[in-house]
Image: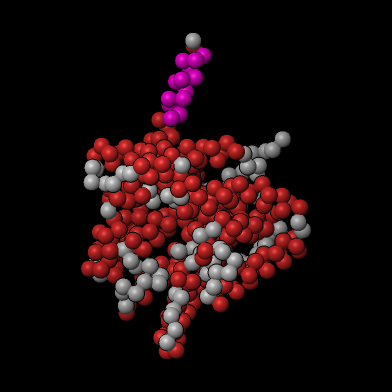
Amino acid sequence: MQTTPKREYGIDLLKVLAMLSIVAGHIFYRGQAGLTSDVFSGVKGLTYQLVNASIICHVNIFVLCTGWLFCTRDVHCRKLVNFWFLMVFYSLTFIGIAKCFYPAVQITHLTWLAGILPIGFNPYWFITQYVALMFMMPLLNSALRTLSCEIMCRFLRAGFFLFVLYPFILRRDMFGLMDGFSAFWFAYLYLLAGAIKIHGLFSIVKNWYAGIIFVVSVILNVLTLHLHEWLCSRVGITSVSHMWGGYTSPFLVVEGVAIFLIFTRLKITSALLQKVLVMVAPSILSVYLIHSNGVFRQITNWNESWTAFFARASTGWSLLVAVLFSLLIFTSCIIIDLVRRYSLRFIFNHWLRFENFR
């Protein structure tokens, strides 16, 4: 009989920060202020790039957290079914809101179909790949349980060279990992997190050393990007700067693992913070489903508005507003999902009482 694992509040907090960084990253990119953007130059552009380089490892961190939490658990189909219904619920909810209150938003037959079949029509790239990862979890868990530490470490080292360093140096995606927008890349990160938990990989790396590695990796990420673009301009070849912003970038992998190691050892003793994390944790993925919904983005029209805002605002002011707006979006999405969760719980409990009474 499988025992209930002890809750790891440090991982819950890291998932919250990772999703908050995803929201902030979307704000940067929809405002055209991403890591490889050439919209801004000078101090303003460098500041944006450093900030963005420090948060863009968010997807890698989120998948590492998944690997850490599920590598020792059984994965049930019920979780996938619930996840599917959650996607359909929010897709159809926003379509209904747009039809009733925002007639200017274009709702086509394809929009309805994508709302009902979110995996087949891929309105959320991350969710599609995450679902594929969920199908692979039993096999990945079996590999983690049966393979020795030595064999697993060999595989992870070879994977780092073949999937991270080799494509980055050659500027080619020869294995179809799509710069990390792939379930196969998620599977590699899952195994990496599982090896860290089960085999104690990187256990000798102290927290202060991991923090230094993170900072150095962020700086090197931006510096090597500028060096690469300068060298390309000197020799007259086309720059492939998107490799620096891809999730398979060696800098982003190192950043993500460094932060991940720190939070796996974090002990949260505050009873209040523990209660907040327990309440918020089940709604973290809903933050992505809500704020990245295509119909919601049409309703808010924030792509164009954020581009204009970043272009005219000062660096400090725009960064502060971006942080505050990220917190606002994250908190609003959490509240919306809490209302959904507790409303369904209330309806279900009353239905059970009615059935028992009858």
User: Looking at the image, is 224 positioned above or below residue 304?
Assistant: below
Give the quarter of the image for residue 209. bottom right
The N terminus: image quadrant: top right
User: Looking at the image, is 198 positioned above or below residue 249?
Assistant: above
Q: Where is residue 294 in the image (x, y as percent from the top left)?
A: 36, 49
Q: Where is residue 11 in the image (x, y as percent from the top left)?
A: 54, 52
The residue positioned farthest toward the top in the image shown: 358
Q: Which of 280 and 286 is in front in this view?
A: 286
User: From this viewpoint, is residue 208 visible?
Assistant: no
The residue positioned farthest toward the front in the image shown: 109
Q: Does the magenta stretch include residue 254?
A: no
Q: Nearer the viewer, residue 170 or 254?
A: 170
Residue at x 52% of width, y 55% of height: 62
Q: Does the magenta stretch include residue 348?
A: yes
Does 183 sit left or right of 89 as displayed? right
Residue at x 71% of width, y 49% of height: 142
Q: What is the magenta segment's predominant secondary structure?
A: helix
Give the quarter of the image for residue 266. bottom right
Residue at x 25% of width, y 59% of height: 305
* Colour mode of the rendering: secondary structure
Please give the range of residues in magenta: 344-356
Residue at x 58% of width, y 60% of height: 185
Does 277 sit left or right of 203 as displayed? left
Q: Position of residue 104 (x, y in %)?
A: 23, 46
Q: Where is residue 19 in the image (x, y as percent from the top left)?
A: 45, 53
Total marks drawn? Answer: 0
Does 70 sit left or right of 88 as displayed? right
User: From this viewpoint, is residue 84 visible?
Assistant: yes
The residue positioned farthest toward the bottom in the image shown: 234
Q: Nearer the viewer, residue 220 or 151?
A: 151
